[in-house]
Image (cartoon, grey):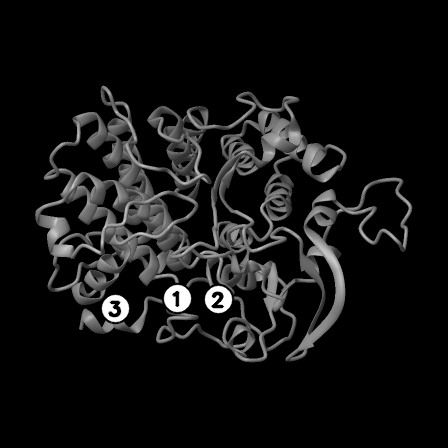
């Protein structure tokens, strides 16, 4: 990132807004003041601001969930004011790296926040009247949030990679690193954060978003950190490392299968939350332009021995369809038609998941499948099928395990964070995603924005 752009973005986020939290009025301190003479209140507020920065761009109509939903054939966005949701995201042979709202999207936001975290980490070393335990908590928190933002870069850019060293004033810009180095950096950040959290007297001395577990207890927030590490380890196919991280996360039950309070336990997790106060933002996934892809309904498994009822259109389908989709008046746009919308986000204050227990159970099943622990994987798969889908159990074999896993992840994590697109790419199965027209394309990754490539020439 160019230093001028990042400095402006960093300065704009240091005077923090709400996110449902009480944040001191910092009177918008300058970036130089924050770097050279940080105060405790400014450091605490900047820590809280990392949550808001990570949320930025996730729930917009042209944001992370919606764009990745289009690419993974989970959703359509029918916006008469901007045809690019179809002409570029589906019908173009390539995404436009010059458009910050489409192909060049989902780059400035995570890197601005990563740099904010680096600025905060430098300020923590200088701030006075903050205990060492408080500093350790801030360091662990900042590095965990950085890892989350780097994961956004990894899943959007994939093999195109991205820079790692975006701290300080860098001229020329930091080099583009490959996907493997980015994922390794994510794991390193999360492990360093764990060390900070486990330091004597470590505490989180600032308001933590209500969407994140742990409040001011580093030992609880560490479970979120471990959940993110499990996701990163699965992405880099370190299956044993994923299982170890899951055992230290908030995953329940800790052994495969189990009978806890299913609805509560499956939704347990960490979320982006929203507000309508000054400086806050709302959930834009409630947009009337966002429709569910019809294949979600047509591909859903049917319950055995079930009789259809025209008054209950999804009665005999996987319960996750009934719980997440509704029938609406059909809309046709550029030759595409859908009569379905999502019910996941009923209003503008509905949280968006970052990572949930249901995801962790399926990550454990995936790791066990890859390690040939089919019996354990089958217990977790069938737990999800029964309690989330209302479906009968399956028997895993070497031939069907991947397909079963991808089905369960598709419906359990539907329209939460682009998981369908990410998963099909991980398993080299993007060619199995439906093309609504023969001339449509399935994109494999977002390009690096033109401004970034130009800066390195």
233 over 35 or under it: above or below: above
Q: Residues within 10 Å of mark 1 (few under 14, many from 20)?
A: many
Q: Which residue is mark 3?
A: 452
Q: Dot 2 lies on which element?
A: loop
Residue 181 at what x, y percent from top left?
Answer: 27, 48
Residue 133 at what x, y percent from top left?
Answer: 21, 25
* 142 or 383, nearer to the observer: 142
Q: Dot 3 lies on which element?
A: helix
For marks 3 and 1 on the same chain, the one whose residue lies earlier in the sequence: 1
Q: Quadrant of residue 138?
A: top left
Q: Which residue is mark 1?
A: 105
In the image, taking residue 284 as reference, residue 219 lies left or right, namely left
Mark 2 and 1 residues: CB-CB less than 8 Å, in contact?
Answer: yes
Mark yes or no: residue 211 visible: yes
- Mark 2 vs mark 3: in front: 2
In the image, taking residue 293 as reference, residue 53 lies left or right, namely left
Residue 300 at what x, y percent from top left?
Answer: 73, 50
Separation of disc 3 and disc 1 at Cα? 12 Å
* Residue at left offset 52%, top offset 32%: 364
Separation of disc 2 and disc 1 at Cα? 8 Å
Mark yes or no: residue 394 visible: no
53 over 137 or under it: above or below: below
Which mark, residue 294?
Answer: none
Q: Which residue is mark 2?
A: 62
Q: Dot 1 lies on which element?
A: loop
216 over 231 or under it: above or below: above
* Residue at left offset 76%, top offset 68%: 329
């Amino acid at each position: 990132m160019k230093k001028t752009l990042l400095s402006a973005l960093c300065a704009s986020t240091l005077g923090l807004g709400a996110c449902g939290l009480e944040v001191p009025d910092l009177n918008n301190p300058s970036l130089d003041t924050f770097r050279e003479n940080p105060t405790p209140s400014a450091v605490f507020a900047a820590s809280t601001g990392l949550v808001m920065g990570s949320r930025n761009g996730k729930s917009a109509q042209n944001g992370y969930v919606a764009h990745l939903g289009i690419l993974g054939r989970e959703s359509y966005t029918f916006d008469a004011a901007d045809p690019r949701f179809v002409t570029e995201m589906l019908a173009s042979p390539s995404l436009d790296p010059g458009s910050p709202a489409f192909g060049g999207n989902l780059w400035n936001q995570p890197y601005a926040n990563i740099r904010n975290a680096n600025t905060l980490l430098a300020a923590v070393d200088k701030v006075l009247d903050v205990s060492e335990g408080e500093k350790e908590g801030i360091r662990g928190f900042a590095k965990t949030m950085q890892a989350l933002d780097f994961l956004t870069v990894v899943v959007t850019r994939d093999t195109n990679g991205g820079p790692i060293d975006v701290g300080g004033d860098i001229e020329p810009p930091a080099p583009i690193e490959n996907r493997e180095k980015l994922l390794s950096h994510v794991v390193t950040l999360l492990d360093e954060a764990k060390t900070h959290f486990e330091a004597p007297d470590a505490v989180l001395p600032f308001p933590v978003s209500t969407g994140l577990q742990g409040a001011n207890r580093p030992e609880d927030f560490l479970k979120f950190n471990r959940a993110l590490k499990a996701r990163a380890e699965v992405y880099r196919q370190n299956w044993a490392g994923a299982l170890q991280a899951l055992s230290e996360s908030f995953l329940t039950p800790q052994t495969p299968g189990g009978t806890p309070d299913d609805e509560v336990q499956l939704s347990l997790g960490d979320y982006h939350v929203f507000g309508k106060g000054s400086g806050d933002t709302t959930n834009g996934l409630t947009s009337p332009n966002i429709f569910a892809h019809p294949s979600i309904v047509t591909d859903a498994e049917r319950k055995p021995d079930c009789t259809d009822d025209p008054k209950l259109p999804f009665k005999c389908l996987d319960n996750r369809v009934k719980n997440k989709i509704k029938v609406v008046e059909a809309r046709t746009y550029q030759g595409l038609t859908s009569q379905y919308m999502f019910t996941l986000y009923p209003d503008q204050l509905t949280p968006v998941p970052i990572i949930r227990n249901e995801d962790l159970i399926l990550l454990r099943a995936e790791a066990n499948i890859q390690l040939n622990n089919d019996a354990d994987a089958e217990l977790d798969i069938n737990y999800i099928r029964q309690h989330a889908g209302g479906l009968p159990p399956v028997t895993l074999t070497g031939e069907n395990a991947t397909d079963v896993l991808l089905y369960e992840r598709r419906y359990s994590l539907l329209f939460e964070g682009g998981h369908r697109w990410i998963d099909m790419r991980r398993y080299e199965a993007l060619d199995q995603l439906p093309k609504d027209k023969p001339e449509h394309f399935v994109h494999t990754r977002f390009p690096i924005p033109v401004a970034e490539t130009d800066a390195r020439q």
